[in-house]
Image (cartoon, rainbow, N blue to C red):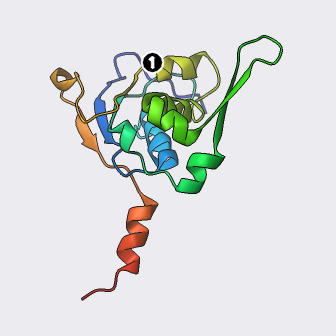
Amino acid sequence: MRTYTPRPSDIERRWHVLDADGAVLGRLASEAARLLMGKHKVTWAPHLDGGDHVIVVNAARLDVSARKATAKRYHRHSGYPGGLRTRTLGDLLARDPERVVRLAVRGMLPKNRLGRRMLRRLRVYPGAEHPHVAQRPVAHPVPSARAARTEREEPAA
């Protein structure tokens, strides 16, 4: 059996909008990574970049538990001795919510040239507005376990 390789003419890039308002960070990131890689397409191939463009809006309104906001830490190093800088998720979400989403999605993409190229098609905005209306993006639902859990727990009247 031969490896399937889609031709460049077979790759059709679409635009998707993910609304992060009330979404769980990991579920949002995994859905964005799936769209960026193109795994939702019939023409998906692991060695080619055939994914779509993804726009994430309302990144500042992610649903993060209070414990995770204080316990999860992001590290970066300046390269100098003693140059380790650490920030909590809550602090980073307050300062730069786009970076939180971008780091979460980056961790779910391939760790090579292909993954870096896929990440270029991710656009993250802290508010509800984005400048990509001309591309006619399609709203894409984000699965949320917390929303499903609260619906199950409420008794039917």
The residue that appears at 35% across and 23% down in the rendered structure is 10
- x and y percent of residue 32 in the render? 43, 37
- x and y percent of residue 100 in the render? 51, 34
Q: Is residue 13 left or right of residue 35?
A: left
View extreme (top): residue: 80
Residue 123 against residue 29 in the figure, above or below? above
* Residue 38 in sight here: no
The residue that appears at 25% across and 41% down in the rendered structure is 139
Badge 1: residue crowd in 10 Å (few <14, some 14–19, many ≥20): few
Image quarter of residue 50? top left
The residue carrying mark 1 is 120
Residue 34 against residue 3 in the figure, above or below? below
Residue 25 against residue 145 in the figure, above or below? above
- x and y percent of residue 77 in the render? 72, 19
Which residue type carries mark 1? Arg
**Secondary structure of the residue carrying numbered label 1:** loop
Task: Report the number of numbered marks.
Answer: 1
**Quarter in which the C terminus is drawn:** bottom left
- x and y percent of residue 28 in the render? 44, 44
